[in-house]
Image (cartoon, helix red, strand yellow):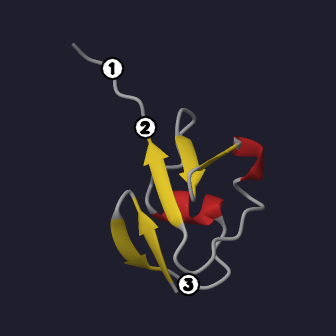
């Protein structure tokens, strides 16, 4: 199955949960924000949200600096 992650196409397994995708990408950090198809997803839903073909996932990780 193919999904878009931060604008880049990725082939992933079917029935992949959002939490699994984040873990695979090593982005399962405490301060990450995720949207799927332009809908902000609460952290409590990461383990229940099954990604679908052509979903668009945006992952934002805050950085501190000047």
Q: Is 65 displayed left or right of 9 in the figure? A: left
Residue 3 x, y percent position in the rendering: 48, 74
Callout 2 crowding tier (Cα within 10 Å): few <14, some 14–19, many ≥20 = few
- Residue located 43% across and 60% down the image: 25
What residue sits right under mark 3 in the picture? 13
Residue 14 x, y percent position in the rendering: 62, 85
Callout 3 crowding tier (Cα within 10 Å): few <14, some 14–19, many ≥20 = few
What residue sits right under mark 2 in the picture? 61
- Residue located 45% across and 55% down the image: 26
Position above or below: 34 against 50: above
Answer with mark 1 or mark 3, whichever residue precedes in sequence: 3
Q: Is 30 displayed left or right of 60 in the figure? A: right
Which residue ends up furthest to the left in the rendered image?
66
Position above or below: 63 against 37: above
Position above or below: 16 against 28: below
Answer with mark 2 or mark 3, whichever residue precedes in sequence: 3
Q: Is 66 displayed left or right of 45 in the figure? A: left
Q: Is 59 displayed left or right of 33 in the figure? A: left
């Amino acid at each position: 199955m193919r999904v878009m992650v931060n604008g880049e196409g990725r082939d992933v397994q079917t029935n992949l949960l959002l939490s699994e995708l984040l873990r695979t990408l090593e982005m399962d950090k405490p301060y990450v924000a995720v949207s799927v198809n332009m809908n902000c997803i609460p952290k409590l839903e990461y383990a229940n949200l099954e990604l679908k073909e052509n979903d668009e996932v945006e992952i934002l990780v805050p950085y501190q600096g000047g």
